[in-house]
Amino acid sequence: MAREKKPVHKVQMTEGKRNIIQMLLQEYDIESAQDIQDALKDLTGGTIKEMMEAEIDNHLGYAKSEHSDSNDYRNGYKPKQVNSSYGSLEIQVPQGRKSTFEPRMVKKRQKDISDIDQKIISMYAKGMTTRQISETLEDIYGFEASEGFISDVTDKVMPQIEDWQNRPLADVYPVLYIDAIHYSVRDNGIIRKLAAYVILGINLDGQKEVLTIQVVENESSKYWLSVLNGLKNRGVKDILIICADGLTGIKEVISAAFAKTEDQRCIVHQVRSTLKYVADKDRKPFAADLKTIYHAPAQEKALEALERVTEKWSKRYPNSMKSWRQNRDAIAPVFKFSSNVRKVIYTTNAIEPKCHLLLTCIDNAVINKAWAGSSEMSLQP
């Protein structure tokens, strides 16, 4: 899936902007890009101070130059170091005699004004270790962030994810897709392969809804039963069709958890699995023949097409059609529905854009934490 391009900011010059720029050039003697960054850093601190001056004026009820009989009055300034997108800077926070002033611009105990939490999580999600993130922050932003601080930041997302994973679900989902993206996970210096299964439902309004993300080291029928029972415990009472790709024990599990639910094997994955046995020169005609099976108007016609394709290609590729015969009952449900419904349920590909979107964002870091509960792990796509 192509990465979405960020909108490009178009500068629109006005007379006021030109005057401000001329004043900056005179005030800061700007000659390089670094001079611009230094000027912005200085202006950031000054702007914050002026805004907090206005805040304390509003809190006390009178301006700095005015007289008041109030027993709460200004009591100097307290220096505070914060991290910004331009590096560390020291700001002067105005104080009140009664210590009741609560600045909103930079709150008490707030040490960062650069949205650095999201930057840390983004770097962690891309597979960087806490040490690498710490070094990168110092190189780019000019302030230190300990490995412990970075680990605390990535841990912040866990309660939110736990709430999301346990949120109540709808009673009925007409279609449920289960598909996976496989990732390498660094565990104490050792790279391990895991599968992140995304369970995507289509609700009664026709909208796609990610129900859960499950990280699996070893799938089994027992495991999938616990997953489906988990959906039931969150309020799901019925699923009409579950579309998946031959997961271990999934057919028996579906019958146990949702007795009336149809198990539809992903036909696109079935085709891909078949064509891996086929030479490049034969793939196009073979794929065209396979299409006559799953595009058949009825199950009887599909079985006839299956026999024709098997007879045509089995001598050259003996194992190519074996899985079609073995999984015939899991492929058959698609023929119970109209062509419009078939387009929705014959493949799990509808889930793939969601997988990539979710797992290349914050959830990458979450998967690490959720699976191991350790800040020493990191996902690598």
Image (tube, grey):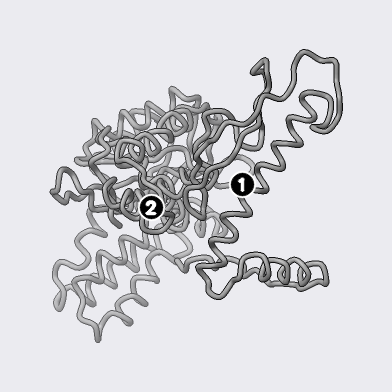
The C terminus is located in which quarter? bottom left
Residue linked to disc 2: 137
Residue 206 numbered mark, or none: 1
Give the mark nearest the N terminus, 2 or 1. Answer: 2
Q: Residue at x 51, y 47 (%)?
A: 89
Residue 335 in sight here: no
Q: Secondary structure at mark 2?
A: helix
On screen, residue 137 above or below 226? below
Question: Quadrant where the N terminus lies?
Answer: bottom left
Point out residue 123 in the picture as x, y percentages from the top left corner: 37, 52
**Quick one: 42 or 313, which is closer to the camera?**
42
Q: How far across and down, in percent of the image, does residue 32 sit?
A: 53, 74
In the figure, residue 66 lies in which quadrant?
Answer: top right
- Spatial CA distance of label 2 from label 1 is 44 Å
Q: Residue at x 66, y 31 (%)?
A: 94
User: Badges 2 and 1: C-beta atoms under 8 Å apart?
Assistant: no
Residue drawn at 32 percent across, 53 percent down: 181
Please tell me whether mark 1 sits on a helix, a strand or a loop. Answer: loop
Q: Nearer the viewer, residue 104 or 51?
A: 51
Residue 34 drawn at (x, y percent): 50, 68
The amino acid marked with disc number 1 is: Gly
User: Is the residue marked by circle 2 packed among few (<14), some (14-19), or many (20+) residues within 10 Å?
Assistant: some
In the image, is 210 to the left or to the right of 280? right
Q: Is 321 on the left-hand or right-hand side of 258?
A: left
Q: Amino acid at mark 2?
A: Leu
Q: Position of residue 219 (x, y in %)?
A: 22, 40
Q: Residue at x 29, y 45 (%)?
A: 130
